Amino acid sequence: MPLVKNGRVATDTFPQVADDADIPADGAVLISAARFLADPETLSQRGGPTAVIWPNNRDLDDVVPFLGRLAVVALVFPTFRDGRAYSQARLLRERHAFKGELRATGQVLRDQFVFMLRAGFDAFEVKKQGDAEAFLATAKRYTVFYQPTGDGRITALHRRMQLRHSESAS
């Protein structure tokens, strides 16, 4: 599956490790929430970056103590109608100040891409190359927003206020 990250199609450097497979001592890995929570101390201190797939029906409070040790949190959209991962993304970015990669997985659709960006996602697993290219074009299309959200962009109101402040200062 193509990975869209930082405005381009990127190589996924986090191979997913099945729950019944051995976890390598070094190198990046992507593991399930259940496997991570079985031994979070050992896994978060291994010799490579660790990523976790976090289902949208799982409480975020379970992963919060380990956020500083995780390189990626992959939030799952099991169906296009299930938006709980949006709430999880906002909580991770805004309440818990997660600075790592926030990845959208599962049913990641073109028409929801801007909403995912605004919620704080910065990486997206898409099904087809055509979807990846559409995501890239959409990311460049919108530059100003009215609502404050988890992506860190300032709102149109704040831009206007900054402009007025700089004009009055000169």
Image (cartoon, rainbow, N blue to C red):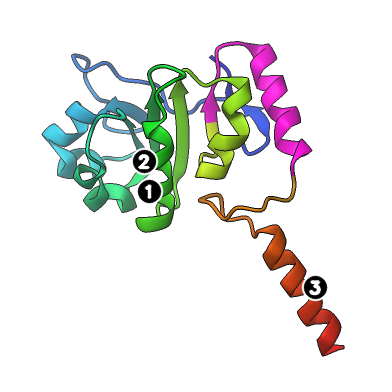
Name the image quarter holding residue 62: top left
From the top left corner, tell me how far across and down residue 161 is, in percent.
73, 73
Residue 49 is one of the magenta-drawn residues: no
From the top left corner, tell me how far across and down residue 7 is, in percent.
68, 36
Q: What kind of residue is marked 2?
A: Gln
Disc 3 element? helix
Q: Is residue 30 left or right of residue 3?
A: left
Q: What kind of residue is marked 3?
A: Leu
Q: Which residue is mark 2?
A: 88
Magenta residues (range): 124-142
Say which residue appears at 70% left-offset and 36% top-offset.
Answer: 139
Q: Which residue is mark 3?
A: 163
Judging depth in this view, the residue of 170 and 64 nearest the camera is 170
Q: Is residue 46 left or right of residue 145?
A: left
Q: Is residue 126 above or below residue 52?
A: above
From the top left corner, tell me how far across and down residue 95 is, in percent.
36, 57
Say which residue appears at 18% left-offset and 27% top-offset.
Answer: 34
Q: Is residue 1 visible from the viewing direction of this image?
A: yes
Disc 1 element? helix
Q: What kind of residue is marked 1?
A: Leu
Magenta stretch, main secondary structure, is helix
User: How many numbered marks have been drawn onto this rendered protein structure?
Assistant: 3
Say which residue appears at 18% left-offset and 14% top-offset.
Answer: 20
Q: Find out whether the residues at labels 2 and 1 contact each other: C-beta distance under 8 Å.
A: yes
